[in-house]
Amino acid sequence: MNSYEPVRSKFNGHLYDRDTLYKWLDERHTDPIEKIEYVDAAGLIRYKGKPATRLDYVPAPVARRRAHEVAAWLHADRAYTP
């Protein structure tokens, strides 16, 4: 099971799951919110926008604790352990 590790963008304050965000950054090198999708001449989907790296995101421990509280409140089937 993949645990949720929130990170916060230094650009806009949005929260992302770390593993999902890092995969996005490795493939597209832009912030997911600050991006523009377009189709190039070969018909491939490309992304442009604010360049971003893993250093542009910081851990968000408060969001992690809050996710645990919400999961407990919802009696989530998948146990969440901080």
Image (cartoon, helix red, strand yellow):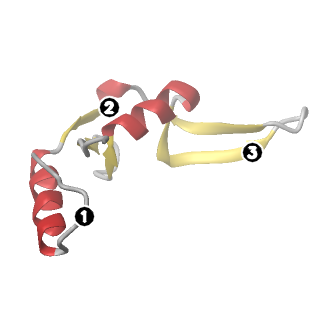
Q: Circle 2 — which element?
A: helix
Residue 11, placed above or below residue 67: above
Type of residue at label 1? Asp
Identify which residue is drawn at 17% across, 52% down. 80
State whether residue 51 appears in this view: no
Is residue 71 shown left or right of residue 52?
left
Quick one: quadrant of the N terminus? top left
Disc 3 residue type (three-letter): Tyr
Compare residues 67 and 62 and report the one nearer the observer.
Answer: 67
Counting residues from the start of the chain, the first of labels 1 and 2 encountered is 2
Q: Name the residue under label 1.
A: 77
Among numbered discs 3 and 1, the one appearing first in the sequence: 3
Q: Name the residue under label 3.
A: 38
Q: Can you give x and y, in whole percent of width and height, for residue 10 in the image?
A: 28, 40
Residue 73: horizontal and vertical position, in percent? 12, 74
Which of the marked residues, 2 or 3, is nearer the chain's N terminus? 3
